[in-house]
Image: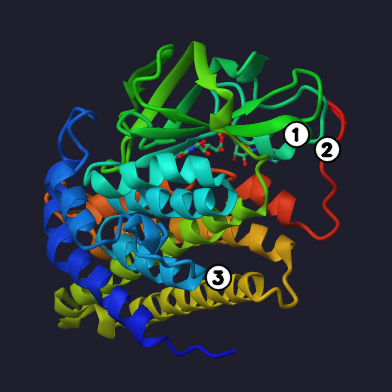
Amino acid sequence: MDYRETEEQKMIREVAHKFAQNEIKPASMEYDHKPDARDTYPWALLKKASKLGLRTMSIPAEYGGGGINDLTTMMLVVEELGYGDNGFAASIRHTIGLSAWMNALCTREQKDEFFPQIVNDDTFVTAYAGTEPNSGTDNAMMSEVPGAGMQTYAEKAGDEYIINGAKHFISNGGIAKLLLVSARTDRKLPLSQCRSVFLVPSGTPGLTVGKHHNKLGRRLINSGQLFFDNMRVPARYMVRRETDAAKFQSFLIPATMIGTFRDAYDELVAYCKVRIQGGKPIIRHQLVAAEISSMRVKIEAARALLYRQAWCWQNQYEYDSQLTLLIRPMLNQITGHMAYQIQELCGAPGVDREMRFEKLSRDLLTMVHGPSTYAGFVRGAPGYLPQTELNG
Ligand SMILES: Cc1cc2nc3c(=O)[nH]c(=O)nc-3n(C[C@H](O)[C@H](O)[C@H](O)COP(=O)(O)OP(=O)(O)OC[C@H]3O[C@@H](n4cnc5c(N)ncnc54)[C@H](O)[C@@H]3O)c2cc1C
């Protein structure tokens, strides 16, 4: 396995890193502190990311996008964006990952209709709507149980589908100009056999955006509540059943988290070098140094596993999908540990809203979501068998 970056990867990663360091980081606290969740989205940063070509990097060049189809390159970019702000990085990541997903699964006609719109509008972001108020983890864990999990239902009516249901906590959900809505097309079959995605432009009659969830952390990404009330979608907007292409997100989400770990680690080391107690910088106290080293090892080990798994998947080389499932819960454990260490090592300033550590702690804790640690470890366990009946 070759760990060297290509010239193209190096160049685009540096663009993303500079943007994160010089533009995202300095602006992120101000947005984060806005009390109303409708005001926390950084439109100015989105426009800058668009000008740099980051938002559209995975759209084929023939549509005016960056033409990057390589997963590792996408991971390097979203990792660097995560170094600036995890919420905003997630907003761009969704658009990058979903565009790659569309490129893999959409028809020529669908791409011809939507890719130019995404490319030509600097404020165009996309969202994936899967989670429902009564079905979060169940969408994954109960996908083999007849009728269980997701209840949003798409019924065929002539050359249209009529969709009814509700979603919540959808990243970019309240601001996206194109929603990829996951729905079942049969009420009784297991979800794994009847789950489809529908391309739903904002403004489609029957689509309503509810509240913008006011979150603990990752406040820079909009989290929307969506309602579908007899929403009519042309049958040509249906995308083939979800397949392995969704794997893009399994790697891109953790890559963004690694970027935020690196950010938190760098900030913490810098602080421990200047904070003097006991007559020396606290990093010179052995127990503190040991904690910092242990954090570093965890981040590097997680990063190495993540990129190795991505490489194996891309190259179809001894790919172990169970191991990939274990990455998210492992990162969630690191997340909790890092948030604790920030609070432990920073002392009182760690809880000061004027310090970046306070925001980082909230952002880290907000990453701990699904398929979160418990269900994630269950799914990734060797020999795991999907549930096939209720209460089974
Ligand atoms: C910031 C943020 C962004 C998000 N973005 C999106 C998005 O863009 N699109 C989208 O569709 N969703 C999104 N979500 C929703 C996310 O996918 C869900 O939160 C996640 O699927 C978990 O569902 P839940 O919150 O309903 O928790 P629950 O499913 O209620 O889980 C609660 C707890 O029970 C455990 N648990 C559940 N079932 C089992 C089981 N069978 N075995 C063992 N343990 C179990 C879980 O591990 C968890 O610890 C987002 C959430 C957040 C917080």
| Number of marks in the rendered image | 3
Q: Are marks 2 and 1 in contact (CB under 8 Å)?
A: yes
Residue 134 lies, in percent from the top left, at 60, 21
Residue 306 numbered tag: 3
Residue 337 lies, in percent from the top left, at 45, 60
Nearer the observer, 367 or 6: 6
Question: Does label 1 point to a residue whose CB lies under 8 Å from ligand 1?
Answer: yes
Which quadrant holds the N terminus?
bottom right
Residue 152 numbered tag: none
Report whether 231 appears left or right of 203.
Answer: right
Report whether 375 appears left or right of 39.
Answer: right
Residue denoted by label 2 = 387
Q: Is residue 152 visible?
A: yes
At mark 1, the secondary structure is loop
Gap in Å between the C-alphas at discs 2 and 1?
6 Å
- Mark 1 residue crowding within 10 angstroms, few (<14) / some (14–19) / many (20+): many
Question: Does label 2 point to a residue whose CB lies under 8 Å from ligand 1?
Answer: yes
- Residue visible at 31% across and 57% down? 343
Decide: is 250 above or below 233.
below
Residue denoted by label 1 = 142
Nearer the observer, 388 or 179: 179
Residue 216 lies, in percent from the top left, at 32, 38
- Residue visible at 60% across and 56% down? 247
Instruction: Assign ligand 1 to one image quadrant.
Output: top right
Gap in Å between the C-alphas at discs 3 and 1?
26 Å
Badge 2 or badge 1: first in the primary sequence: 1
Please state which amino acid type lies under the numbered disc 2: Gln
Decide: is 196 above or below 275.
above
Badge 3 or badge 2: first in the primary sequence: 3
Residue 334 lies, in percent from the top left, at 49, 62
Which quadrant holds the C terminus?
top right
